[in-house]
Amino acid sequence: MADIAVIGGGAAGAAAFGELLARFDAGTIHWIVGQHEPGRGVAYATSDDRHLLNVRASSMGVFQEHGDDFIRHAAQQLGQVKGTDFLPRRVFGDFIQAQVGARIDAARRAGRSFRIHPESARAIVQRGEGGYAVRVGPDRWLDVSLVVLAVGALAQRPLRTVSTTALTSGAYELDPWQLDRHVKAPRRVVVIGTGLTAVDTLLSAAARWPYAELIAISRHGLWPFTHAALPLSPYPRQSELNQALLGCDGVAPMLREVRRAIDSAPDTDWRSIIDGMRPINALLWQRLSHDQRKQFLRHVRWIWEASRHRMAPASGEAIYQLQEEGRLQVLAARVLDVDGTAPLQVTLRERATQLVSVLEADLVIQATGLDTAVAYGAHELLSQLLRDGVASADALQLGIRAEPDGQLLGPSGEPRPGLYAMGSLLRGILWECTAMPEIRTAAHHLATQWVQGVVGDSSESAGEGP
Ligand SMILES: Cc1cc2nc3c(=O)[nH]c(=O)nc-3n(C[C@H](O)[C@H](O)[C@H](O)COP(=O)(O)OP(=O)(O)OC[C@H]3O[C@@H](n4cnc5c(N)ncnc54)[C@H](O)[C@@H]3O)c2cc1C
């Protein structure tokens, strides 16, 4: 038995499946994709061309050796395309499907064995003799020696401050990508969150409901910064800075080093200094103690996310224009309560004044970002893995416990040979692992190492990225 199961039909699952298809011929590769169209996942399923990639076209690829495949693919659809462009995410979804399709054709010609299952994986059980049994759909079991968990982030849980009445009113939307199901035009839409998902949600809402008043609320009321229109020159002393950062003990000294670098290089754009840290971000995270990570999450995360995961210049322009036109207002406030039916009553406390006020909204959309708190989520497979002690939750609820190469760890830290995760579930150990550059590196590494019979540490990639 040398079969492999890749679980998850998003971009990470597609990357792992495609990498394995190209090199594994000792058994069957099962790709368990769930109920959605395979290859697109959450990020690339959008059909709204206002939703742009936040990585330049030249850095987007599904597989490790991607060259300018995406640029050429996009040019066929969009006409002239430059590597520095930020293109619609839909086009990248099409590209993933084309790339995996080509690998499938090649695997067929080479006589390789694979199966695609349009169902969910519902349980994984360790077999006494080694390997795993994976339950697919209601009652079908696959025996495999390698499992790659690429199930993405969890479905959003409602904020604790939202009442059951509000939740069941039909006016509170937990899935920001499902605006189409709101047929009646709202007069006022409140979006909770001001990150990248909130930006896309607001752009869609503004186009769909041209007369609606839009309000975005987050604790700091800060949009993601924008990418520069053209790639920036690197910071000449980046390697010196990175060495210094690796020598820091704690978050505050790291911040001081970064600030010093920014202040001492007035000719360098701060964004290029942040981007230049990309190859060491996972290492920096791993060097922080539990308490230092907590400190980062509490005090630094909001500004790090806004600086590191920037929006495409066109998305920024569109958001700022909505604000200038008076159609969109952004509030730095804490949401204390959401209650009522339609309209919903949103109670908030403004950050600057500490004043409490109540807003009425016909539609409230929760766009608060990735949820990877597996212990609290309702994901059938992940809950079973935790319940049965096959996997364990990260101590800060940032996914599951794993080695840096993705190998899962049980409740006492015991390694689970042949059971690996990729993408968002690894935030606890890698912090930055959700974007395509990291995902395709991880997929390549896992596939090549598995085929060679060894799996070690995943390498890191550099670049602006999302
Ligand atoms: C809105 C948005 C925009 C982004 N933009 C960019 C960008 O421009 N560039 C970039 O590099 N990155 C971007 N990212 C990061 C993005 O997370 C990755 O690029 C990538 O899409 C992650 O894919 P994934 O497969 O890990 O997760 P997901 O996209 O969440 O896919 C996971 C899939 O697994 C399925 N699944 C879950 N459980 C099971 C199960 N038990 N059995 C079978 N299937 C299951 C789910 O239904 C889903 O289809 C963006 C992310 C978001 C959310």
Image (cartoon, rainbow, N blue to C red):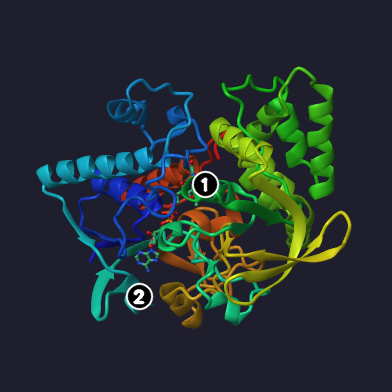
Q: Is residue 147 left or right of residue 305?
A: left
Above or below residue 321? Residue 23 is: below
Task: Count neighbours of disc 1 (C-alpha within 10 A) and say few if under 14, some if 14 to 19, many if 20 or more.
Answer: some
Residue placed at 63% from the left, 45% from the top?
327
Please, which residue is most extreme toward the right here?
Answer: 353
Is 306 positioned to the left or the right of 52 in the image?
Answer: right
Quarter of the image containing the N terminus? bottom left
Q: Are marks 1 and 2 in contact (CB under 8 Å)?
A: no
Secondary structure at numbered mark 1: loop
- Could you tell me which residue is drawn at 79 percent across and 54 percent down? 299
Q: Tell me the quarter of the picture where residue 163 sits.
A: bottom right
What residue would you read off at disc 2? 122
What amino acid is at disc 2? Arg
Which sits in the foreground, 384 or 369? Answer: 369
User: Residue 412's spot in the image, x, y percent?
Assistant: 58, 75
Q: Is residue 241 visible?
A: yes
Work out whether residue 62 can be spotted.
no
